[in-house]
Amino acid sequence: MKVTISRKAHFNAAHRLYRKDWTFEKNDLIFGKCNNPNYHGHNYELIVSVTGAINQETGYVMDVKFLTDIIKEEVEIPFDHKNLNLDVPEFENLNPFSAYDTNGNLFESQFFIGKKPLVIYFYPKDDTLGCTAQACSFRDVYEDFKELGAEVIGISSDSVSSHQKFSTRNKLPFILLSDENKKIRNIFGVPQSFLGLAPGRVTYVTDKSGIIKMIFDNSMMPTKHISMALATLKKIS
């Protein structure tokens, strides 16, 4: 029998979403209050769960004190009452973002970017021919990405429900994020394609320090993104 234990943590942090290559007016239009030059604070609630078999000697799945200590060391101390732009090196030149994943869970970039290499690919729409081919190509070599210590994250403006169906239908093993308001696209500066008529298809590769090492922008060759990302990861690993 497996049991799940959870611990909840609360912390507060300030940040500013701002692209230096945009005017203040454009930043204000896209990011709203989060573009405040004096920074903008948020209260965060984090729930960490561990599922496993019960140890027959201790009756534990995991010592909850150990779990609490991990949360404190990895989350609360680095982030609580900090300015993410000024006090956390990983976010110095990065706009953090959050979105709901395929399972309806909140994905927060600060727990991934700067922790391991990432392949973040933006695609136009679930269930279209090119996007399906691209997703399945990532799926077919997903273990190659894992062996390089990397995680694959797909992002489109489709809903969580659409992502769930798309992921299940194609047996996708990686994360899909719902960016319905296109805020993440704006943070990354993903351009439109086909004369501005369709969302762009762009792949970013970041190293384990969160530094972008590759940007591949090509809407016409969806499966080419996979080989380009793998080649980049092999160079930086």
Image (cartoon, helix red, strand yellow):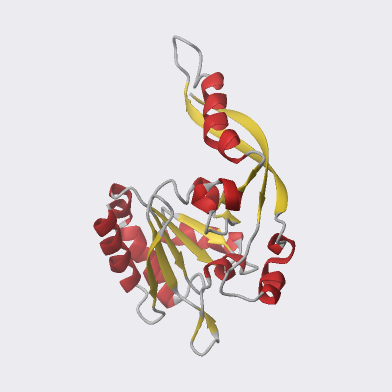
Residue 113's spot in the image, x, y percent?
Answer: 47, 51
Horizontal and vertical percent position of residue 166: 49, 63
Observer-nearest residue: 20 or 142?
20
Looking at the image, residue 52 sits to the left or right of residue 143; the answer is right
Q: Position of residue 94 (x, y in %)?
A: 53, 58
Judged left or right of residue 141, residue 175 is right
Total numbered circles? 0
Instruction: Pick whichever, 28 or 220, lies toward us.
Output: 28
Specify the farthest residue to the right. Answer: 33
Where residue 156 appears, x then y in whole percent? 53, 68
Towards the viewer: 221 or 137: 221
Taking the spot 37% from the left edge, 74% from the top edge, the residue there is: 222
Question: Is residue 70 positioned above or below 175 on the image?
Answer: above
Residue at 66% x, 71% y is 27
Q: Reply above or below: 9 against 179.
A: above
**Residue 96 in view (yes/no):** yes
Q: Residue at x 54, y 49 (%)?
A: 110
Residue 104 visible, this orientation: no
Q: Given the current orientation, which residue lies at the most extreme bottom position? A: 195
Residue in the foreground of this view, choosing between 81 and 225: 81
Q: Which image quadrant for residue 75?
A: top right
Up-down: is 147 above or below 58? below
Q: Is residue 234 left or right of residue 185?
A: left
Question: Which quadrant would residue 162 be assigned to in this image?
Answer: bottom right
